[in-house]
Amino acid sequence: MIQAVIEFDTVSNSCYAHAQSSTGSPSTSKYSFSCSSLTAPGDSFEWLVTTTSSDFNTIEFELNGVLKMTWTSSNVFGCTAPCISMTDVYAQSVWAGAESGPLAYTYGNMYSGAGDMDYTGVHMFNCGSSSCIIVVTAEYSNAQYTNLSGSGTSYDQTYLAGSFVTSYVTSGASGGSVTNPSYIVGEPDGNYAVLAAPNSGDSAYDEGSFGAKYNGTIAIYGYSYNNGGGAYYSYVQVAVSATGSSWTTVYSATWDPSSGNTPTYIPIASVTGIEYVKITVSDNSGLSAKIYVDAISIFVGSYVQSQPTGGYGTTGGGTVTNPTDIVGIPDSAYTNLHAPNSGDSAWVEGNFGTLYSGELVIDGYSYNNGGGAYYSYVTVQVSSTGSSWTTVYTNTWNPSSGNTPTWITIASVSNIQYVKVTVSYNGGYSGDIYMDAIFVA
C-alpha cells in the first residue's frame, strides 16, 4: 500500500507532505511547508506516481505546479526498483487535519487495486465528537475512499485549496434566466452556470451547498460576459446561510465586462459558520446583467469581518477617518489613521469572526504628500479575546510611490481573532496611513 499524506495544522500553520507504505516499512522524509501557501483560491498540490512498465518507480509531490520532493521505491518500500508490481498494491492519498475545525479535516483521496490514481474531489473526514489526532499508519486504509478507473503508466492527483460547492440546491428567475444551474458544483472544469437579467426588473439566482458548515472566505470563479458592444455591467449579490432558509447578504457589486471572457477568482466575503450560498444577478439602473459561474469555493483565511464596538480611538490630536472601511475585501474604500504632532496617535480594531493562524497582511500605504512625508510609525497587535493584546509588528512605512496600496506582510500569527493597528508620531515624523483591507491565512 502507498500512502501519500499531507498533515495540516492550522494552529501552527505547518504542513508536511510524505509518502510511505504500510506500517513497518522504512520511515520516509517529510517535505515541510507553510499551509498558507496551499489555501488561497487556485492553489494546488499534486501527487504523481511514475512506473516503469508495470513496476512502481517513484512518487512525487508538487506544490502549485513546482516539484518539491521525490520518494523512490527504496524510500517507500525498502527495496530497489523494479521490486513492486503496481498490480499488487493500492494507493491512497489523504488530506488530514490535526486540530479541530471543518477545514482542518478536508481531504482528497485516491484508491485503486491496480494503482490507477486520479483526483476524486474534496470530502469531509468525519472524526465524530472528539478531536482528530491522526497517526500516519496503514489504518488510513480504514478511511473513506473512492474506487477509480484509469490507464497508462503515470497517475496523478490534483487538490485545489478549499471546499467547493458540493451540491446544487435550487435556482429561479423573475424575468431573467438561469442556464445549467448545477454547473456551480465542484472545482473549475470549464462548465458554466449562466445567470442573465436582460431587462428592467429582471433577476435570476442560483443556490448551492458546501455540504457542511465552514469558516473562511468565499470566492467565485467566473466573469461578467463581454458581448463586444459595451455590455454587460452585471449587478451581483451574494447571500449566505447556515440553514438554507435564513439569508444574510454579504456582497453587492457590479462586475465589469470581462476582457476576453476569461474567468478569475473574485473574492466575495469572509464568513463564519455558513453552509449555503446564493448568487443573484439583477438589471440595475438600466444595465443588463449576464454572468458565467464555473465554481464557488470557500478557503481558509479571513478578511476583517466586523469592527468591535468602540473599536477605534485617538490620543492627542490624532484622527481616525472611516474606521469601518477596514472591514471586508479590498474595495478602494480606506480607513485613514493620522498622527500629525508629537504625542499623537490613532488606532483601529478589527474582528476576523473566529480564531485563525497564518500570515497576517495589510493592504494599504503611507500617504505621500509630495513634500517628503509621511514616514509613518505603525504598530500591529493581535488578540484571541479582544482584551489581552500582543504586539507582533513595529515598523516605519515609507511614503508610497503614487499612493498605491500594496500587501504588506505583518507577522506569522497563531490562534488570533482580533487585530489592532496603531499609527503614532515618532522620532519627529508624523504618521498618515490608509488601509483598504486586513487578511489572515
Image (spheres, rainbow, N blue to C red):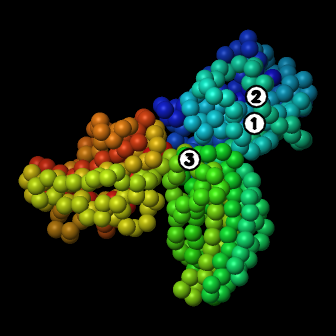
- At 79% from the left and 67% from the top, the residue drawn is 180
Q: Position of residue 389 (x, y in %)?
A: 29, 37
**Relative to residue 180, is residue 427 depicted above or below?**
above
Residue matched to label 2: 143
Residue matched to label 3: 273
Q: CA distance from mark 2 to mark 3?
A: 25 Å
Q: Earlier in the sequence, mark 2 or mark 3?
A: 2
- At 32% from the left and 52% from the top, the residue drawn is 309
Q: CA distance from mark 1 to mark 3?
A: 25 Å
The local secondary structure at tag 3 comes to strand
Q: Earlier in the sequence, mark 1 or mark 3?
A: 1
- At 75% from the left and 20% from the top, the residue drawn is 139
Three-letter amino acid code at the position of disc 2: Ala
Numbered circle sitting on residue 109: 1
Q: Work out which residue is located at the far top of the displayed protein and give it.
A: 24
- At 40% from the left and 54% from the top, the residue drawn is 306
